[in-house]
Image (cartoon, rainbow, N blue to C red):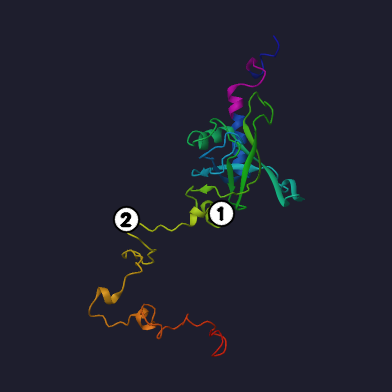
């Protein structure tokens, strides 16, 4: 017999109850010393099969879960450095999450690119710092097989460099980053038609009728024979055959010279 069967049920690595207790203690510790964060799974829209990236990816799910901010003395990494591309901020950190909590809170409900574990490229939003972190690597073997199991994930993260991804999670603090930092021109497009095809403008009065754009050929004198409004174009001489009543006379050869200058 390789191990003493009087201890650890003869398995040498602890029985099921011991493993469950150890995992419960880890979860309790994370709940006491951890922080509430939002896990944002990445959704691929148009993946580049050559470069393996998706510049059009979006984030439309959020999952609130507790994680422990492992680098308690500050960020790790190179911090602020000057490279050939200019100033770069490289602030790295590590988040710790219990595997059981991950499965219950995220994995069972989320649509993940790779099921069963946190994904590289997913985002963690930390309300305490109002900051986003991108997962670079998922460490699942630290601590190494204590009581014969791997109870936590350690997520190696760095500050997320936002590049106009869609944020539609339903959390205002997260979604507001898109309106503030996005360079996508389509976010600033104006909708000119409603569902019935009518041309619209923004309505500032709640419950009132929509405002409409007016065609250039619209004129109140044409629409109403009783209107006594002056026709601005005619009064200014813009639409008359004679140039005598025009505000600007473009027939002058040199409007800034003497009376005989430019006369041939």
Percent from the top left, x then y, of residue 89? Answer: 71, 50
Q: Nearer the viewer, residue 15 or 93?
A: 93
Q: Mark number for residue 183?
A: 1
- Please tell me whether residue 35 belongs to the stretch shown in magenta: no
Q: Which residue is at 49% across, 57% downward?
A: 188
Give the crowd class for mark 1: few <14, some 14-19, many >=20 residues within 10 Å.
few
Find numbered disc 1 in the image and state the secondary structure of the residue it sits on.
Answer: loop
Discs 1, 2 touching: Cβ within 8 Å: no
Toward the front, the furthest residue is 264
The answer to whether 42 appears left or right of 88 in the picture is: left
Instruction: Tell me which numbered mark, 1 or 2, is placed earlier along the sequence.
Output: 1
Query: Is 1 displayed left or right of 201 in the figure?
Result: right
Q: Residue at x 70, y 47 (%)?
A: 91
Placement of the N terminus among the 4 image quadrants: top right
Q: How many marks?
A: 2
Within-10-Å neighbours for mark 2: few <14, some 14–19, many 20+: few
Mark 2 lies on residue: 197
- Residue at horizontal 49 percent and vertical 54 percent from the top: 187
Residue 109 picture location, percent across and down: 47, 36
In the image, 33 versus 224, the foreground residue is 224
Q: Position of residue 46 (x, y in %)?
A: 52, 39
- Which is in the foreground here, disc 1 or disc 2? 2
Q: Which corner quadrant of the image does residue 181 belong to?
A: bottom right
Identify the mark at residue 80; answer none if there is no mark.
none
Single out the residue that lies furthest toward the top. 1
Magenta residues (range): 9-20
């Amino acid at each position: 017999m390789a191990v003493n069967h009087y201890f650890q049920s003869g398995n040498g690595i602890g029985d099921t109850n011991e493993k469950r207790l150890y995992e419960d203690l880890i979860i309790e510790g994370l709940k006491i010393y951890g922080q509430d964060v939002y896990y944002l799974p990445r959704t691929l829209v148009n993946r580049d099969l050559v470069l393996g990236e998706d510049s059009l990816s979006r984030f439309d799910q959020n999952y609130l879960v507790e994680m422990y901010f492992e680098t308690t003395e500050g960020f790790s990494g190179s911090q602020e450095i000057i490279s050939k591309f200019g100033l770069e901020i490289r602030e790295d950190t590590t988040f710790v999450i219990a595997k059981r909590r991950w499965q219950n809170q995220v994995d069972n409900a989320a649509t993940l690119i790779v099921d069963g574990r946190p994904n590289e490229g997913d985002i963690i939003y930390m309300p305490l710092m109002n900051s986003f972190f991108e997962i670079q690597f998922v460490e699942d073997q630290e601590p190494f097989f204590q009581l014969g199991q791997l109870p936590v994930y350690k997520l190696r993260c760095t500050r997320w460099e936002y590049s106009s991804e869609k944020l539609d999670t339903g959390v205002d603090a997260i979604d507001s980053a898109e309106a503030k930092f996005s360079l996508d021109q389509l976010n600033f497009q104006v909708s000119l038609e409603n569902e019935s095809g009518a041309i619209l403008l923004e309505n500032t009065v709640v419950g009132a009728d929509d405002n409409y754009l007016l065609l250039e050929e619209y004129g109140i004198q044409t629409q109403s024979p009783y209107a006594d409004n002056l026709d601005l174009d005619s009064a200014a001489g813009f639409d008359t055959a004679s140039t005598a009543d025009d505000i600007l006379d473009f027939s002058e050869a040199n409007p800034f010279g003497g009376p005989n200058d430019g006369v041939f």
